Amino acid sequence: MDFEFTAEQRDMQQLVRQFARDVIVPRAAEIDERDEFPRDIVKEMAKLGILGLPIPEAWGGVGADFVSYILAIEEISYASAALGVVLAVHTSVGTFPILYFGSEEQKRKYVPKLASGEFLGAFALTEPGAGSDASSIRTRAVRDGDTYVLNGSKVFITNGGEADVYCVFAVTNPAEGSHGVTAFLVDRDTPGFQIGRKERKMGLHGSSTAELLFEDARIPMDNRLGAEGEGFTIAMRMLDTGRIGIAAQAQGIMRAAFDAANRYVRNRRQFGKDLFQFQSVQFTLADMATKIEASHWLIYNAAFRKMRDLPCAKEASMAKLFASDAAMQITTDAVQLFGGYGYMADYHVERFMRDAKVTQIYEGSNQIQRIVISRHI
Ligand code: COS
């Protein structure tokens, strides 16, 4: 087993790290406070190729490997978890489904635009009554000649309202349960498709989370992704990969919290000593560093397996479960080390803590990750 990143992976990490530190870090607090989608930064990311990193050059992407992509999510999330999820959702579950399951025509129509960042992608599975229990979705797609008529709604859709194309899951055959679900590519300007309520969230301010409403939206046959009834498998396969990205997002957040805490305890004096000189503080930092290291190996093990086309569903769920719990613990500990200052917005660690929470919830709650893991063992 090779434990080193390649020169190309390191170069990519360096490039994205520099961009994140120069362009995103100075704006991160403002993005959080204004809670507005940072379109200008997303455009800058597109110019650098970040929105098409793991997409083959033949399809307009950079052609970087999957590990480089995961490193990029981590670096962007270190600076802003909100931008980290824009990237992760756009790529893992917005672009990959088309690349892996799309017809040649669908790939030609969408992938180059998504890879260049001209288009932003999104993934719409969750509904008001179907979150963890994804196969109980109700959005209906009824075939009518050479179109499907979509009715229903989706909630909590990342990039909702900002994306140009949505991978939407709907029931084509209610008698078939999960085998009656079909995937569709829905263009933003489809008549009958509207963006509903935009959510106000605990964290990830700046990333868009919206409701999607379908009222007799006619989707051309050509926009059905994969075969009828293949939708649930497509969703599950894409989430397997997506969860590695969310784990990397958690990794970026926890590293940012650790670095902030590690700096702070060397400058803060109480009882005549630097905080760092108290053994309890050293132990807290030691625990944080150990969790970061363990999480790193789980994530890169899953990413290497995915890169080599080896089964990775179990490893992805383990990485997401462990990294998100570690991020929650580490950001909470960071706030505690900062004391009263940690609770104040000016010191950023409270933002890291708010941002970390959702990584335990979305792309499958950690209870769902335990279901996936236990089924594999
Ligand atoms: N890859 C390929 N196929 C898969 C799969 C995967 N990872 N997971 C399940 N399937 C297939 C199964 O093999 C099964 O097919 P067969 O009936 O032919 O055997 C079918 O899909 C149904 O699977 P299963 O019976 O396991 O479905 P469940 O209803 O029990 O649900 C979980 C499985 C809980 C894992 C699934 O509903 C899930 O992941 N829920 C969370 C959804 C989620 O992450 N939402 C976040 C959305 S993005 S914010």
Image (cartoon, grey):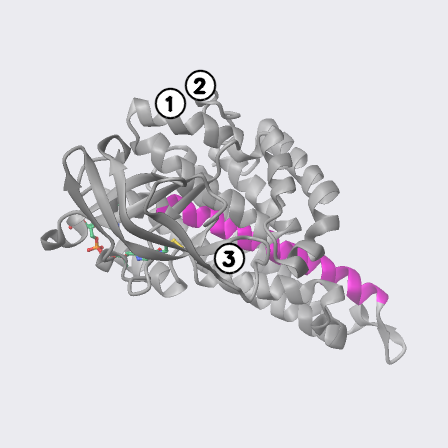
- How many numbered discs, if any? 3
Amino acid type, label 1: Arg
* Residue 374 point in image, percent of width and height: 29, 60
What are the residue bounds of the magenta stretch? Answer: 239-267
Looking at the image, residue 340 lies above or below residue 372 = below
Q: Is residue 163 left or right of residue 180?
A: right
Badge nearest the viewer, 2 or 3: 2
Looking at the image, residue 185 lies above or below residue 141 = above
Along the viewing direction, whichever of 377 and 40 lies nearer the viewer: 40
Is 100 magenta? The answer is: no
Q: Which residue is mark 3?
A: 323
Q: Is residue 21 left or right of residue 236?
A: right
Which residue appears at 45% of the width and 24% of the height? 56
* Residue 165 point in image, percent of width and height: 40, 39
Amino acid type, label 3: Ala
Q: Is residue 27 left or right of residue 198?
A: right
Q: Which residue is mark 2?
A: 58
